[in-house]
Image: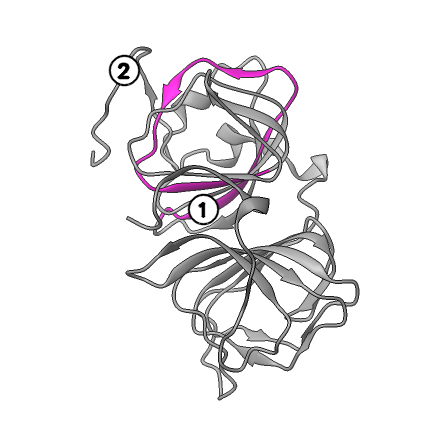
Amino acid sequence: MTHAGKRRVIIDQVPQRVWRAAGLPFGLLTRQINADPETGAQTLVVDVPPGWHMPAHWNGADLELLVRDGDLTIAGRQCRPGHYLFLPSGTELGPVSSEQGATLIFWTDSPFEVRTDAPPAPSTPLGETVDIFDQANWRPVREAFAGVTDTSSHGDLEVPTQCIRLRKVEESGKDTILFVLPRRFAKTALEFHHSTEEIFFLGGWCATDPEHVYHAGEYLCWEPGVIHGVVTGWEAICLSKHHGPLTSPQIPLGATSVDAER
């Protein structure tokens, strides 16, 4: 399993720490939202101070980040709120800087390390999506994942789930996805996933069942096999990371357990 299962985390209540790592310029503050001690993977919220600067470097881990607020220049890109980057291991990063400061949602899939020796070729191409809040970039889930995985619980909805597939890893099934639940969204089917799922709630509200309602600034992590539903929402914007294939099979109402290994 990747990352510990957590039902709810209120991000502002997680203590900030000074991020200290060899070769990392002083000034970054982090909140560790989740971690996997076996692989060194981390889920962080990073605050970058105004005027912060870092020379060119590279990292041996795959990194993902979403600019939540502020500005960031990295890997030759000038990023504003809503800009997502997937930075594969070996990608040359830098110089990295921020004029106004920034808040980032940040994932690393193995221990974070600053490298300045000659980088290898990137493991995969750099991937990016600009402005996740632009409705022109949203597509129905079943269209975005057509032929890729089981999303049967997303069928026959009066108001379809919209999404952007930010990171597409067809060989492993790992995906990072922006889900958008429009007004009056309701999905009566129960579902579960075969892999760990993390969700940052960026806007609106979303109920994963009648007793659990999430708002902007909260985080959720489900272990494989956790049943959720009825799912409802109102202008909910959810940043979701699946650590394996996005399987969302529909299961009978009233089910209390499933075999997540199948």
- Distance (Cα) linking label 1 and label 2: 27 Å
Q: Is residue 76 left or right of residue 199?
A: right
| Amino acid at dot 1 | Asp
| Observer-nearest of 167 and 65 | 65
Give neighbour class at mark 2: few <14, some 14-19, many 20+ (Cα, 10 Å). few
Residue 9 spot, x, y in % from top left? 49, 40
Residue 119 in magenta? no
**What is the magenta range?**
173-201
Quadrant of the snapshot with the C terminus: top left
**Against 20, is 131 above or below?**
above
| Observer-nearest of 250 and 112 | 112
Instruction: Please report the residue visible at 48 percent of the width from the left and 66 percent of the height from the top.
Output: 88
Instruction: Please report the residue visible at 62 percent of the width from the left and 56 percent of the height from the top.
Output: 104
Query: For residue 255, which numbered disc appears in the image?
Result: 2
**Against 37, is 231 above or below?**
above
Tell me the element at label 1: strand
Residue 197 in magenta? yes
